[in-house]
Amino acid sequence: MTIDWPDKFAREGHELFLSGLPIALHCHHYNMNLQKTLETSLGSEGVLLLYKAAEESSYAGFTSFLEHHPKIVTAKSKLELASTSYQYCGLGIVNLTKVGPEGGIVTSPHSHHVTGWLAKFGKRQNVGCFFTGGWVAGVLAAIYNKHIGYFSVNELECKMTLARKCIFEVKIA
Amino acid sequence: MAIDTDKIVHAVMHGSRIREEKGIIPLFGVYLSMISVQYYNKISFGFEKATGNDGFAEKLLVEAGQECGYATFQGVRSSWEWEEVVKPMIEDREDQIHCFVSIAIAFGWGDLTVQELVPGKKLVLRATDLYEAKGYLDVYGKADSGKCYMVRGVTGALMDLVYGDDYPEGCFQYTAVETSCVVKGDPYCEFIAQRAAS
Ligand SMILES: [Zn+2]
Ligand SMILES: [Zn+2]
Protein backbone atom coordinates (compact mmCIF):
# COMPACT_ATOMS: atom_id res chain seq x y z
CA MET A 1 0.00 0.00 0.00
CA THR A 2 1.32 3.40 -0.87
CA ILE A 3 0.28 6.68 0.67
CA ASP A 4 -0.31 9.81 -1.31
CA TRP A 5 1.56 12.12 1.08
CA PRO A 6 0.74 15.38 -0.71
CA ASP A 7 -2.89 14.40 -0.27
CA LYS A 8 -2.32 14.14 3.50
CA PHE A 9 -0.79 17.62 3.69
CA ALA A 10 -3.61 20.05 4.29
CA ARG A 11 -4.23 23.60 5.32
CA GLU A 12 -7.22 24.57 7.43
CA GLY A 13 -7.28 28.32 7.69
CA HIS A 14 -3.90 29.27 9.08
CA GLU A 15 -3.09 25.79 10.41
CA LEU A 16 -1.13 23.04 8.66
CA PHE A 17 -1.75 19.36 9.13
CA LEU A 18 -0.04 16.22 7.94
CA SER A 19 -2.42 13.30 8.19
CA GLY A 20 -4.37 15.13 10.87
CA LEU A 21 -1.33 16.07 12.96
CA PRO A 22 -0.64 19.79 13.47
CA ILE A 23 2.72 20.68 11.95
CA ALA A 24 4.72 23.81 11.24
CA LEU A 25 7.13 24.64 8.48
CA HIS A 26 10.42 25.83 9.82
CA CYS A 27 13.74 26.20 8.15
CA HIS A 28 17.23 25.03 8.93
CA HIS A 29 18.12 28.36 10.55
CA TYR A 30 15.59 27.81 13.32
CA ASN A 31 16.07 24.05 13.69
CA MET A 32 19.85 24.25 13.91
CA ASN A 33 19.78 27.25 16.18
CA LEU A 34 17.46 25.49 18.62
CA GLN A 35 19.79 22.49 18.64
CA LYS A 36 22.84 24.65 19.22
CA THR A 37 21.11 26.65 21.96
CA LEU A 38 20.15 23.49 23.84
CA GLU A 39 23.52 21.81 23.41
CA THR A 40 25.43 24.90 24.45
CA SER A 41 23.35 25.70 27.49
CA LEU A 42 22.42 22.26 28.80
CA GLY A 43 25.10 19.92 27.39
CA SER A 44 24.07 16.26 27.52
CA GLU A 45 20.75 17.18 29.15
CA GLY A 46 20.00 19.36 26.13
CA VAL A 47 20.92 16.55 23.75
CA LEU A 48 18.57 14.23 25.63
CA LEU A 49 15.79 16.82 25.45
CA LEU A 50 16.17 17.04 21.66
CA TYR A 51 16.18 13.24 21.33
CA LYS A 52 13.20 12.79 23.66
CA ALA A 53 11.15 15.53 22.00
CA ALA A 54 11.72 13.89 18.62
CA GLU A 55 10.99 10.42 20.01
CA GLU A 56 7.75 11.45 21.71
CA SER A 57 6.45 13.48 18.79
CA SER A 58 7.31 10.85 16.17
CA TYR A 59 5.74 8.16 18.36
CA ALA A 60 2.54 10.18 18.77
CA GLY A 61 2.46 11.17 15.10
CA PHE A 62 3.08 7.72 13.70
CA THR A 63 0.73 6.00 16.16
CA SER A 64 -2.07 8.32 15.13
CA PHE A 65 -1.17 7.82 11.49
CA LEU A 66 -1.38 4.02 11.81
CA GLU A 67 -4.72 4.30 13.61
CA HIS A 68 -6.07 6.23 10.65
CA HIS A 69 -4.76 3.57 8.24
CA PRO A 70 -5.79 0.19 9.68
CA LYS A 71 -5.11 -1.55 6.38
CA ILE A 72 -1.40 -1.10 6.84
CA VAL A 73 -0.59 -4.19 8.87
CA THR A 74 2.82 -5.63 8.14
CA ALA A 75 5.90 -4.29 9.84
CA LYS A 76 7.60 -4.07 6.45
CA SER A 77 4.98 -1.74 5.01
CA LYS A 78 4.89 0.33 8.20
CA LEU A 79 8.67 0.75 8.03
CA GLU A 80 8.45 1.75 4.38
CA LEU A 81 5.80 4.32 5.19
CA ALA A 82 7.84 5.71 8.03
CA SER A 83 10.74 6.32 5.72
CA THR A 84 8.57 7.89 3.01
CA SER A 85 7.00 10.19 5.62
CA TYR A 86 10.50 11.24 6.72
CA GLN A 87 11.30 12.09 3.14
CA TYR A 88 8.00 13.84 2.56
CA CYS A 89 8.57 16.04 5.59
CA GLY A 90 11.81 17.28 4.07
CA LEU A 91 13.80 15.50 6.76
CA GLY A 92 15.88 13.47 4.30
CA ILE A 93 16.42 9.81 3.48
CA VAL A 94 16.36 7.19 6.18
CA ASN A 95 16.91 3.51 5.46
CA LEU A 96 14.85 1.28 7.75
CA THR A 97 15.40 -2.04 5.95
CA LYS A 98 17.99 -3.39 8.39
CA VAL A 99 16.08 -2.88 11.58
CA GLY A 100 13.48 -5.04 13.29
CA PRO A 101 11.80 -5.73 16.64
CA GLU A 102 15.17 -6.61 18.18
CA GLY A 103 16.91 -3.52 16.83
CA GLY A 104 19.50 -3.28 14.07
CA ILE A 105 21.14 -0.60 11.98
CA VAL A 106 19.59 2.48 10.40
CA THR A 107 21.45 4.60 7.90
CA SER A 108 20.80 8.05 6.51
CA PRO A 109 22.74 9.29 3.48
CA HIS A 110 21.06 12.73 3.45
CA SER A 111 19.14 14.77 5.96
CA HIS A 112 17.73 18.20 6.68
CA HIS A 113 19.71 18.34 9.89
CA VAL A 114 23.03 17.42 8.25
CA THR A 115 22.56 19.80 5.31
CA GLY A 116 21.30 22.51 7.64
CA TRP A 117 24.05 22.11 10.22
CA LEU A 118 26.85 22.08 7.66
CA ALA A 119 25.36 25.11 5.87
CA LYS A 120 24.96 27.09 9.07
CA PHE A 121 27.78 25.99 11.36
CA GLY A 122 30.14 23.79 9.32
CA LYS A 123 31.78 20.52 10.33
CA ARG A 124 31.19 19.11 13.81
CA GLN A 125 33.67 17.18 15.91
CA ASN A 126 31.05 14.80 17.30
CA VAL A 127 27.88 13.11 16.04
CA GLY A 128 24.91 15.47 15.96
CA CYS A 129 21.73 13.88 14.59
CA PHE A 130 19.81 13.75 17.86
CA PHE A 131 16.55 14.60 16.12
CA THR A 132 16.90 11.67 13.72
CA GLY A 133 17.93 9.29 16.51
CA GLY A 134 14.87 10.18 18.56
CA TRP A 135 12.64 10.10 15.51
CA VAL A 136 13.79 6.53 14.71
CA ALA A 137 13.25 5.38 18.31
CA GLY A 138 9.72 6.82 18.29
CA VAL A 139 8.53 5.37 14.98
CA LEU A 140 9.98 1.93 15.81
CA ALA A 141 8.14 1.91 19.15
CA ALA A 142 4.93 2.84 17.30
CA ILE A 143 5.48 0.19 14.62
CA TYR A 144 6.28 -2.65 17.03
CA ASN A 145 3.66 -1.63 19.58
CA LYS A 146 6.14 -0.82 22.30
CA HIS A 147 6.29 2.02 24.77
CA ILE A 148 8.32 5.20 24.37
CA GLY A 149 11.86 4.49 25.49
CA TYR A 150 11.73 0.81 24.51
CA PHE A 151 14.38 1.31 21.85
CA SER A 152 17.57 3.25 22.29
CA VAL A 153 19.22 4.73 19.24
CA ASN A 154 22.86 5.66 19.22
CA GLU A 155 24.55 7.41 16.32
CA LEU A 156 27.84 5.70 15.45
CA GLU A 157 28.93 7.82 12.51
CA CYS A 158 27.64 11.19 11.38
CA LYS A 159 27.80 13.13 8.18
CA MET A 160 28.02 16.32 10.24
CA THR A 161 31.57 15.16 11.02
CA LEU A 162 32.01 14.55 7.28
CA ALA A 163 31.50 10.77 7.53
CA ARG A 164 30.00 9.30 4.35
CA LYS A 165 26.60 8.83 5.93
CA CYS A 166 24.95 8.77 9.32
CA ILE A 167 24.80 5.32 10.90
CA PHE A 168 22.59 4.59 13.90
CA GLU A 169 22.63 1.51 16.08
CA VAL A 170 19.22 0.53 17.46
CA LYS A 171 19.02 -1.61 20.60
CA ILE A 172 16.36 -2.60 23.06
CA ALA A 173 16.98 -0.20 25.92
CA MET B 1 -0.96 47.06 -5.21
CA ALA B 2 -2.23 45.33 -2.09
CA ILE B 3 -0.37 42.36 -0.66
CA ASP B 4 -2.13 39.19 -1.69
CA THR B 5 -1.60 36.78 1.23
CA ASP B 6 -3.48 34.01 -0.54
CA LYS B 7 -1.08 34.17 -3.44
CA ILE B 8 1.92 33.90 -1.11
CA VAL B 9 0.32 31.04 0.85
CA HIS B 10 -0.39 29.28 -2.41
CA ALA B 11 3.22 29.65 -3.54
CA VAL B 12 4.49 28.18 -0.27
CA MET B 13 1.97 25.32 -0.34
CA HIS B 14 2.88 24.54 -3.91
CA GLY B 15 6.64 24.86 -3.40
CA SER B 16 6.67 22.81 -0.23
CA ARG B 17 5.31 19.84 -2.15
CA ILE B 18 8.48 19.65 -4.16
CA ARG B 19 11.24 17.36 -2.89
CA GLU B 20 14.66 16.97 -4.36
CA GLU B 21 16.05 13.45 -4.47
CA LYS B 22 17.76 13.80 -1.09
CA GLY B 23 14.42 14.37 0.64
CA ILE B 24 15.25 18.03 1.30
CA ILE B 25 12.84 20.92 0.62
CA PRO B 26 14.73 23.93 -0.72
CA LEU B 27 12.28 26.81 -0.91
CA PHE B 28 12.50 30.59 -0.67
CA GLY B 29 16.26 30.36 -0.14
CA VAL B 30 16.14 28.06 2.89
CA TYR B 31 15.76 24.33 3.63
CA LEU B 32 12.28 23.70 4.98
CA SER B 33 11.10 20.94 7.27
CA MET B 34 7.63 19.82 8.32
CA ILE B 35 7.76 18.83 11.96
CA SER B 36 4.91 18.44 14.41
CA VAL B 37 4.34 21.48 16.59
CA GLN B 38 4.45 19.13 19.59
CA TYR B 39 8.18 18.71 18.96
CA TYR B 40 8.89 22.44 19.08
CA ASN B 41 6.79 22.93 22.19
CA LYS B 42 8.47 20.04 23.99
CA ILE B 43 11.86 21.54 23.24
CA SER B 44 11.04 25.12 24.17
CA PHE B 45 9.04 24.49 27.30
CA GLY B 46 11.17 21.47 28.31
CA PHE B 47 14.19 23.78 28.08
CA GLU B 48 12.42 26.41 30.15
CA LYS B 49 11.40 23.90 32.84
CA ALA B 50 14.89 22.37 32.91
CA THR B 51 16.45 25.75 33.62
CA GLY B 52 14.05 26.68 36.37
CA ASN B 53 11.82 29.26 34.67
CA ASP B 54 14.21 32.04 35.59
CA GLY B 55 14.10 33.84 32.25
CA PHE B 56 17.32 32.25 30.95
CA ALA B 57 15.59 29.92 28.47
CA GLU B 58 13.09 32.63 27.52
CA LYS B 59 15.89 35.00 26.55
CA LEU B 60 17.69 32.37 24.46
CA LEU B 61 14.51 31.14 22.77
CA VAL B 62 13.49 34.68 21.81
CA GLU B 63 17.02 35.27 20.49
CA ALA B 64 16.87 32.00 18.52
CA GLY B 65 13.57 33.14 17.00
CA GLN B 66 14.97 36.56 16.17
CA GLU B 67 18.28 35.40 14.73
CA CYS B 68 16.50 32.77 12.69
CA GLY B 69 13.74 35.09 11.57
CA TYR B 70 16.47 37.48 10.45
CA ALA B 71 18.38 34.83 8.47
CA THR B 72 15.24 33.12 7.21
CA PHE B 73 13.52 36.19 5.81
CA GLN B 74 16.78 37.48 4.38
CA GLY B 75 17.00 34.13 2.53
CA VAL B 76 13.36 34.51 1.55
CA ARG B 77 13.70 37.99 0.13
CA SER B 78 16.84 37.02 -1.80
CA SER B 79 15.17 34.01 -3.44
CA TRP B 80 13.89 33.68 -6.97
CA GLU B 81 10.44 32.78 -5.58
CA TRP B 82 10.33 36.16 -3.85
CA GLU B 83 11.45 37.90 -7.02
CA GLU B 84 8.77 36.14 -9.03
CA VAL B 85 5.78 35.93 -6.68
CA VAL B 86 6.18 38.57 -4.02
CA LYS B 87 8.22 41.46 -5.39
CA PRO B 88 5.63 42.58 -7.95
CA MET B 89 3.25 43.31 -5.04
CA ILE B 90 5.73 45.50 -3.16
CA GLU B 91 5.48 49.26 -3.53
CA ASP B 92 7.18 50.52 -0.41
CA ARG B 93 9.34 49.30 2.44
CA GLU B 94 6.37 48.69 4.69
CA ASP B 95 4.93 46.21 2.21
CA GLN B 96 7.89 43.94 2.93
CA ILE B 97 6.68 43.51 6.50
CA HIS B 98 3.22 42.52 5.26
CA CYS B 99 4.77 40.00 2.87
CA PHE B 100 6.95 38.50 5.60
CA VAL B 101 3.86 38.11 7.78
CA SER B 102 2.04 36.38 4.91
CA ILE B 103 4.93 33.94 4.63
CA ALA B 104 4.84 33.28 8.38
CA ILE B 105 1.12 32.49 8.02
CA ALA B 106 1.92 30.21 5.10
CA PHE B 107 4.48 28.39 7.25
CA GLY B 108 1.71 27.54 9.72
CA TRP B 109 2.99 29.78 12.53
CA GLY B 110 -0.45 31.25 13.27
CA ASP B 111 -3.13 33.75 12.30
CA LEU B 112 -0.84 36.77 12.43
CA THR B 113 -2.04 40.25 11.54
CA VAL B 114 -0.22 43.56 11.40
CA GLN B 115 -2.03 45.72 13.91
CA GLU B 116 0.15 48.81 13.62
CA LEU B 117 3.27 49.77 11.74
CA VAL B 118 5.03 53.04 12.34
CA PRO B 119 7.89 53.10 9.82
CA GLY B 120 11.24 52.65 11.52
CA LYS B 121 9.69 52.95 14.96
CA LYS B 122 7.16 50.35 15.90
CA LEU B 123 5.54 47.13 14.74
CA VAL B 124 2.55 45.57 16.48
CA LEU B 125 1.54 42.03 15.52
CA ARG B 126 -1.44 40.14 16.84
CA ALA B 127 -2.65 36.55 16.70
CA THR B 128 -5.29 34.51 18.49
CA ASP B 129 -4.06 31.06 17.59
CA LEU B 130 -0.32 30.45 17.90
CA TYR B 131 1.03 26.94 18.33
CA GLU B 132 3.30 27.94 21.18
CA ALA B 133 0.42 29.35 23.24
CA LYS B 134 -1.85 26.43 22.41
CA GLY B 135 0.87 23.88 23.21
CA TYR B 136 1.70 25.54 26.51
CA LEU B 137 -1.93 25.70 27.61
CA ASP B 138 -2.51 22.06 26.68
CA VAL B 139 0.38 20.78 28.77
CA TYR B 140 0.87 23.27 31.59
CA GLY B 141 -2.29 25.37 31.74
CA LYS B 142 -2.30 29.12 32.31
CA ALA B 143 0.82 31.14 33.00
CA ASP B 144 1.43 34.68 34.19
CA SER B 145 3.79 35.65 31.38
CA GLY B 146 3.70 35.33 27.58
CA LYS B 147 5.03 32.09 26.10
CA CYS B 148 5.21 32.78 22.36
CA TYR B 149 8.97 33.15 22.20
CA MET B 150 9.51 32.26 18.56
CA VAL B 151 6.96 34.76 17.19
CA ARG B 152 8.21 37.41 19.63
CA GLY B 153 11.74 37.02 18.27
CA VAL B 154 10.47 37.06 14.70
CA THR B 155 8.59 40.34 15.33
CA GLY B 156 11.89 42.01 16.21
CA ALA B 157 13.59 40.39 13.22
CA LEU B 158 11.09 41.84 10.74
CA MET B 159 11.92 45.36 11.93
CA ASP B 160 15.66 44.55 11.90
CA LEU B 161 15.41 43.46 8.28
CA VAL B 162 13.39 46.39 7.01
CA TYR B 163 14.66 49.28 9.12
CA GLY B 164 17.92 48.04 10.64
CA ASP B 165 21.41 48.29 9.16
CA ASP B 166 22.12 46.29 6.04
CA TYR B 167 22.21 42.51 6.44
CA PRO B 168 23.96 40.98 8.37
CA GLU B 169 24.69 43.96 10.64
CA GLY B 170 21.14 44.81 11.68
CA CYS B 171 20.11 41.86 13.83
CA PHE B 172 18.90 42.73 17.37
CA GLN B 173 18.63 46.45 16.62
CA TYR B 174 14.97 46.06 17.45
CA THR B 175 13.54 44.18 20.37
CA ALA B 176 10.06 42.83 20.93
CA VAL B 177 7.88 42.22 23.95
CA GLU B 178 4.72 40.13 24.19
CA THR B 179 2.25 42.45 25.85
CA SER B 180 -0.75 40.08 25.83
CA CYS B 181 -0.78 36.32 25.54
CA VAL B 182 -3.52 33.73 25.31
CA VAL B 183 -1.78 31.66 28.01
CA LYS B 184 -2.36 34.53 30.45
CA GLY B 185 -6.07 34.49 29.63
CA ASP B 186 -5.86 37.41 27.18
CA PRO B 187 -8.04 37.20 24.06
CA TYR B 188 -5.01 37.37 21.76
CA CYS B 189 -1.24 37.43 21.74
CA GLU B 190 0.26 40.81 20.94
CA PHE B 191 3.87 41.61 20.13
CA ILE B 192 5.42 45.07 19.99
CA ALA B 193 8.83 45.60 18.45
CA GLN B 194 10.71 48.85 18.94
CA ARG B 195 14.29 50.07 18.67
CA ALA B 196 16.45 48.33 21.24
CA ALA B 197 17.98 50.58 23.86
CA SER B 198 21.64 50.95 22.93
ZN1 LIG C 1 24.34 12.39 11.64
ZN1 LIG D 1 1.26 34.26 23.23
Image (cartoon, rainbow, N blue to C red):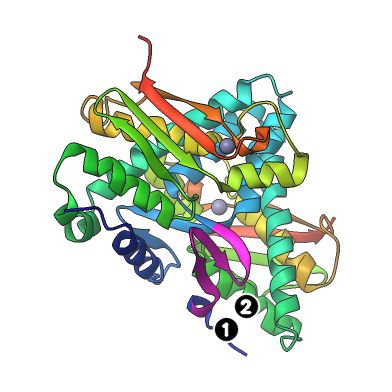
Q: Nearer the viewer, mark 1 or mark 2?
A: 1
Pinpoint the chain carrying mark 1: A
Of residue B113 and residue A143, the one placed in the foreground of this image is B113
Left or right of B122 in this view: A83: right
Can you say whether B57 is above or below A134 in the image?
above
Left or right: A122 as drawn, with respect to B169: right
Mark earlier in primary sequence (1, 2)? 1
Q: Main secondary structure of the magenta part?
A: strand
Q: Residue at x 66, y 39 (%)?
A: A47
The spot of residue B5 in percent (x, y) is: 32, 57
Q: Secondary structure at mark 1?
A: loop
Residue at mark 1 = A3
Residue A103's spot in the image, x, y percent? 78, 67
The single residue placed furthest to the top in the displayed view is: B198
Which residue is identified by label 2? A81
**Label 1 – label 2 distance at C-alpha:** 8 Å
Q: Residues within 10 Å of mark 2 (few under 14, many from 20)?
A: many
Could you tell me how many numbered marks the image carries?
A: 2
Judged left or right of residue A62, residue B91 is left
Residue A155 visible? The answer is no
Kindly identify the residue that appears in the image at 68 percent across and 30 percent down: B48
Residue under the image location 57 percent in, 45 percent down: A128
Amino acid carrying label 1: it is Ile
**Highlighted magenta segment, given as a residue range:** A7-23
Disc 2 residue type (three-letter) = Leu
Q: Where A146 sits versus B102, above or below?
A: below
Residue A11, percent from left and from top:
49, 67
Closer to us: B89 or A61: B89
Residue A45 lies in the magenta-colored region = no
